Amino acid sequence: MKHKLIEQVIAKLESDLAGLKKAAAETHAITSHDENKQEGKYDTRSIEASYLADAQTSQALTIQESILKIRNITLIDEPETAILGSIVILSSDHQDHQFLLLPAGGGITLEYENQPLTTVTPDSPIGKSIIATSIAEQIPNTPIGNVFVSEIY
């Protein structure tokens, strides 16, 4: 099941990447279009479009690196502690929260067993809280409150 979730994350990132590459190409085309020729020394439309295109290209490279990191992850069926590739369920008095620990691509919400599952990285506040935890371990003061690790797989 983790493989299917990983593939969904990769598909989402690839979709984002395709949109970003298209936007970067369009923005780059704007920088050299005749309508954006500088009309005075304070006209910066072309320069601003160039900065935007560079930023979009940089973001596309970041997404490509994220996809590569996720593809290279080794999945372990039943890890003893929360490691990259683990699904971790945190429980509180009121509800359960499901997370998939990944090296990149945090913040994507998927559905797993008819419940929302959120991807997190060890760099995120919740990821820092749960990495290397064990089942039944109490975790106080997380971004979602006081919780305990009810399952890791």
Image (cartoon, rainbow, N blue to C red):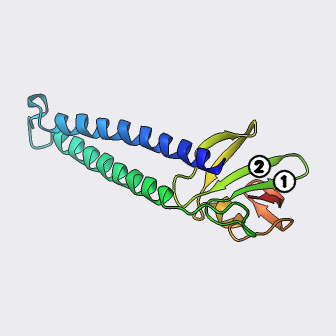
Residue 1's x, y, as percent?
Answer: 66, 47
Rendered residue at 75%/69% (across/down): 80
Q: Is residue 48 above or below residue 35?
A: below
Task: Find residue 133 and report its image quarter.
Answer: bottom right
Reading the chain from its start, which is encountered first: label 1 or label 2?
A: 1
Return the x and y of residue 138 as percentages of the image width and height: 85, 66
For label 2, the crowd category at 10 Å Cα-Cα, with few meaning under 14, some 14 to 19 and many 20 or more, is some
Q: Position of residue 82 (x, y in %)?
A: 71, 66
Q: Position of residue 95 (x, y in %)?
A: 85, 46
Q: Nearer the viewer, residue 47 or 89?
A: 89
**Relative to 149, is 24 above or below?**
above
Could you say which is closer to the camera, residue 147 or residue 99?
Answer: 99
| SS at badge 2 | strand
Residue 134: image quadrant is bottom right
Q: Is residue 30 above or below residue 47?
A: above
Disc 2 target residue: 97
Mark 1 and mark 2: Cα distance apart in space:
6 Å
Question: What is the quadrant of residue 31 in the picture?
Answer: top left
Q: Residue furthest right?
A: 93
Front position in the image: 144 or 102: 102
How many numbered badges does the structure rendering display? 2
Q: Residue at 61% across / 63% down in the picture?
A: 84
* Secondary element at tag 1: strand
Q: Is residue 17 left or right of residue 140?
A: left
Question: What residue type is disc 2 on?
Answer: His
Write the residue at 72% across / 66% down: 79
| Front in this rendered view, residue 101 or 45 | 101
Residue type, label 1: Ser
Relative horizontal placement of residue 126, taking residue 59 as reference (left or right): right
> Residue furthest toward the top?
35
Mark 1 highlights which residue?
91
Q: Pointer 1 and pointer 2: residues touching (CB < 8 Å)?
A: yes
